[in-house]
Image (spheres, rainbow, N blue to C red):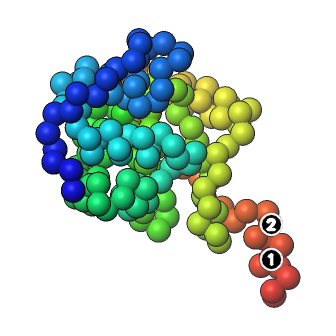
Amino acid sequence: MIASTQTNYPMVGNPDSDSASPVERATAKLKAAGLRITQPRLSILAALSAREQPTTIEQLHQDVGPENCDLVTVYRCMAAFEEIGLARRAFFHNGTALYEINLGQPTRFHVYCKATNQVVELDGDTTSDLRRAIDGVQEVLRARGYDEVAHLVEFFGVAPSQNRLTSAAS
């Protein structure tokens, strides 16, 4: 395991520029929040940003490698990342929390297939419609005096190809 000491991670260029890597942008967010830049955090951020879909802490730990970072460190780092808005957590029907990196991009919405446990991102048009609806609800709640309004939206179903398999088995 790598010790959780400060590292001299070199920041190349401007982390706010379009050419900055996801890890560079995430590192800037850690610094802005006053968190130390450690080798385990960098490894976890690299693994998280490499994932196309939300992932479990156990999958991140496997990606990072148990020889580089223990599971408890991954849990603690993900809690810290979530607290500063660097990671987004989603819960799915089997109780498993999945995480994705949040570097200021719009929230992505997913549908979870209950038959295969696969997670699929919603298409752009559906996502745009959903964002408009959520923004409207948030505006109404703020107008009613609510502060720190947040939401969690996830969808569950059986994928069309799985419906055919289920029907054929009957």
Which of the numbered marks, if any, corresponds to residue 161? 2
Q: Is residue 120 above or below residue 104?
A: below
Residue 109 located left or right of residue 7: right
Camera sees residue 121: yes
Determine the residue positioned at 39% across, 18% down: 12
In terms of secondary structure, where does tag 1 sit?
helix
Q: Pick whichever, 79 or 24, lies toward us.
A: 24
**Residue 10, x across and y down, in percent:** 31, 23
**Farthest-out residue, bottom:** 170
In which quadrant of the rendered view does residue 5 lie?
top left
Determine the residue positioned at 67% across, 43% down: 122
Residue behind mark 1: 165
The type of residue carrying mark 1 is: Leu
The type of residue carrying mark 2 is: Ser
Q: Pick whichever, 125 or 13, lies toward us.
A: 13
On-image quarter of the C terminus: bottom right
In which quadrant of the rendered view does residue 147 lie?
top left
**Residue 73, x across and y down, in percent:** 23, 53
In which quadrant of the rendered view does residue 151 lie?
top left
Asked if the residues shown at circle 2 and circle 1 are in contact, with their CB atoms under 8 angstroms apart, the answer is yes
Label 1: few (<14), some (14–19) or many (≥20) C-alpha neighbours in 10 Å: few
Q: Pick whichever, 167 or 73, lies toward us.
A: 73
